[in-house]
Image (cartoon, rainbow, N blue to C red):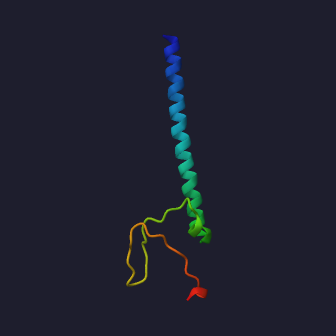
């Protein structure tokens, strides 16, 4: 009986630890992203770990197309 209780506590500890680590990882990841957004980090445009899902502000006459990547247009291309 003692061995089963010990194994149960060890499994519970492992599951709870994984949950806590996952929550901490997500909080840190979102915190770093918001710092980059506040700093207007232009490398976000080329970052493969960031996915833009929806435009919330666009010029008049713009159309929102699903799954279409956004590209930076520089003044030299115009």
Work out whether residue 67 can be spotted: yes
Report x, y in % for residue 16: 51, 34
Image coords of residue 43 (percent x, y): 62, 68
Q: How many marks?
A: 0
Residue 17 found in image quarter: top right
Q: Can residue 41 be seen in this view?
A: no
Residue 25 horizontal/vertical position (percent): 57, 48
Q: Residue at x 49, y 62 (%)?
A: 51
Residue 75: quadrant of the picture: bottom right
Q: In this view, does 21 lie above or below 51?
A: above
Quadrant assignment for the C terminus = bottom right
Give the farthest residue toward the bottom. 78
* Residue positioned 48% across, 70% down in the render: 69
Q: Is residue 42 above or below residue 78?
A: above
Q: Position of residue 47 (x, y in %)?
A: 58, 64
Residue furthest toward the top? Answer: 1
Front residue of 35/59: it is: 59
The residue nearer to you, when weighing 16 against 74, is: 74
Please give the name of the residue rendered at 58% of the width and 86% of the height, measured from the top-left corner. Answer: 77
């Amino acid at each position: 009986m003692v061995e089963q209780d010990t194994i149960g506590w060890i499994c519970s500890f492992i599951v709870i630890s994984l949950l806590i680590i996952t929550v901490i990882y997500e909080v840190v990841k979102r915190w770093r992203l918001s710092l980059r957004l506040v700093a207007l980090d232009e490398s976000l445009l080329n970052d493969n770990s960031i996915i833009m899902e929806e435009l919330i502000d666009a010029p008049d006459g713009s159309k929102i197309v699903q799954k279409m990547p956004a590209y930076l247009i520089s003044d030299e291309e115009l």
